[in-house]
């Protein structure tokens, strides 16, 4: 996959929220499954976020939310994945967890508890 650029982000209409210890990316598209969201977009956004924040790729915690509520949480640090697994029993695949049937607000609420 080619790295995503600012132009790509603008064209896709992706809106970022960098105000927390994790980054939220809202995507104005629907996806059938969260795994599709990860494969088509979320993985390419992690280096983009690292570059924007001026941090190492391994420090990025990215929550990508599609218009229809599919969520992908990308994090090299398994602390976040373990915490979310404890809350929702959604397994990880690599550095990502896929949420097809969990409301995005619940995931963000749990991350807020871990990252005050």
Image (tube, rainbow, N blue to C red):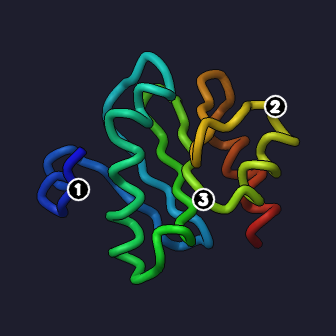
Q: Nearer the viewer, residue 68 or 73?
A: 73
Query: What residue is at 80 percent from the left and 49 percent from the top?
Result: 82
How far is the residue under mark 3 from the one under mark 2?
Answer: 18 Å
Q: Residue at x 46, y 69 (%)?
A: 57
Q: Are marks 1 and 3 in contact (CB under 8 Å)?
A: no
Give the x, y percent position of residue 58: 54, 68
Q: Earlier in the sequence, mark 2 or mark 1?
A: 1
The mark nearer the N terminus, 1 or 3, is 1
The residue indicated by pointer 1 is: 3
Report, in whole angstroms, how far the alpha carbon at label 1 lies from the one at label 3. 18 Å
Q: Secondary structure at mark 3?
A: loop
Q: Is residue 61 left or right of residue 33?
A: right
Residue 5, how many percent across, how many down?
18, 60
- Residue 113 location, quadrant: bottom right
Choose the circle earlier in sequence order: 3 or 2.
Answer: 3
Residue 110: x, y in percent?
A: 78, 51
Which residue occupies 32% across, 64% down? Answer: 48
Marking on residue 94 = none
**Between 45 and 28, the one nearer to me in the picture:** 45
Numbered mark located on residue 89 in the image: 2
Q: Would residue 96 be found to the left or right of residue 8 on screen?
A: right
Q: Residues within 10 Å of mark 2 (few under 14, many from 20)?
A: few
- Name the mark nearer the viewer: 3 or 2: 3
Query: Disc 2 and disc 1: Cα gap in Å?
Result: 31 Å
Vertical placement of residue 87 versus 49, above or below: above
Name of the residue lying farthest toward the bottom: 54
- Residue 26 pos. (x, y %): 41, 47
Residue at disc 1, secondary structure: loop
């Amino acid at each position: 996959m080619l790295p995503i650029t600012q132009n790509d982000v603008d064209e896709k209409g992706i809106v970022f929220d960098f105000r927390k210890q994790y980054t939220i990316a809202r995507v104005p598209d629907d996806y059938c499954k969260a795994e599709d969201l990860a494969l088509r977009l979320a993985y390419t956004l992690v280096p983009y976020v690292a570059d924007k924040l001026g941090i190492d790729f391994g420090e990025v915690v990215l929550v990508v939310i599609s218009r229809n509520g599919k969520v992908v949480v990308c994090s090299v640090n398994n602390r976040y994945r373990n915490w979310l697994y404890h809350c929702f029993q959604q397994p990880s695949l690599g550095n990502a967890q896929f949420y097809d049937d969990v409301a995005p607000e619940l995931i963000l609420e749990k991350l807020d508890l871990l990252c005050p």
